[in-house]
Image (tube, rainbow, N blue to C red):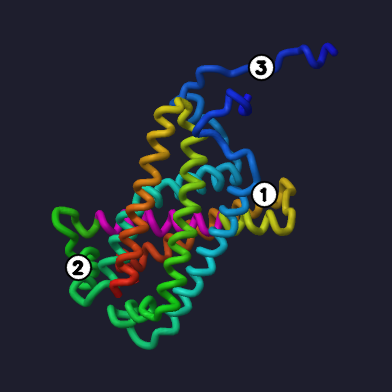
Amino acid sequence: MTELTKKRPEFRNINAFKDLTTYRMAAAAWVSILHRASGGIMFLLLPLIVWLFDTSVSSEISHGVFQSAFTAGVGIVPAWFIKLVVLALIWAYLHHLIAGLRHLYMDMFHAVTKEFGRSSAVVTLTLSIGLTLVLGAKLFGLY
Amino acid sequence: MTYGSKRVVTGAHYGLRDWLVQRVTGALFALFTLIVLAKVLLTSGPLGYEGWAAIFSPQWMKALTFAVFLAITWHIWIGMRDIWMDYIKPVGIRLALHVFTIVWLVACLGWAVQVLWRL
């Protein structure tokens, strides 16, 4: 009974700048919060995604606008900025996809050990960042 | 307390459905990505406008793409609703954000569908 009544330490009024920045998150925690952040980014950029689909597929002329967006920009928006935003979209999509497949795998095979959680999280981060670098280099014309 | 008179209009659905829908729609989109990717890789020569438009022009591909757009809209709704429920506590602000999310999603979906069948 004494154990039950003993109060556990309580933390209130967490300082976002001091306390959140000193958290040491495990790899799985990074995958989790980035899964959410990448989804939020894609939601906010949804009109841009539809615009990219529209201009690229609608006609020869609109396809020209699509292509020149990456070389000369659109209106007052410079090309480097568009590439940067598209790079963010590429990362967001890759991370969200791979982290989602990790969820599906865990659900199907009841893969719930601590060790699998860690190793699959490391694989997710490595793959998503690695593929983003490869595709990003292509986007910025490095090869 | 989340039942009876304490239930919140913007609260959770307290069930399995959202969880299952999120997985099914996510798997559908992964599959769709594979199909588009395969079509891109199977295009002979440089992709260009013709090759890219040809990927989406068959009627079956338009129908499939439409179904996938619908699925992903549902997926985004569940995900964004989770985010609002976790971080936004006042019911009024949360309700406003829910409405904004739906308007944003339906507007984008309508635009994407128009692009598809104008092709």
Which residue type does callout 3 highlight? Pro
Badge 3 or badge 2: first in the primary sequence: 3
Instruction: Give the residue at mark 1.
Output: A117
Amino acid type of the residue tagged 1 in the rendering: Gly
- The single residue placed furthest to the bottom in the displayed view is B44
- Report how many numbered discs are placed on residues in the image: 3
Q: For mark 1, name the chain.
A: A
Q: Which numbered dot is residue A1?
A: none
Q: Is residue B21 left or right of residue A40?
A: right
Most common secondary structure along the magenta stretch: helix
> Toward the viewer: B113 or A35?
B113
| Residue B45, horizontal then vertical, whole percent | 35, 87
Q: Which residue is mark 3?
A: A9
Question: For the residue labelled by badge 1, is the local secondary structure a helix, a strand or a loop?
Answer: helix
| Dot 3 and dot 2 within a common chain | yes
Q: What amino acid is found at the position of numbered circle 2 in the picture?
A: Val
Tag 3 secondary structure = loop
1 and 3 marks on the same chain? yes
Work out whether residue A19 or residue A35 is closer to the camera in this orientation and state it.
Answer: A35
| Residue A2 sits above or below residue B9 on the image | above
Vertical arrangement, residue A59 with respect to residue B27, above or below: below
State the CA–CA distance, disc 1 to disc 3: 28 Å
The stretch of residues the image draws in magenta is A81-99
Gap in Å between the C-alphas at discs 3 and 2? 59 Å
In primary-sequence order, the first of circles 1 and 2 is 2
Earlier sequence position, callout 1 versus callout 3? 3
Residue highlighted by disc 2: A65
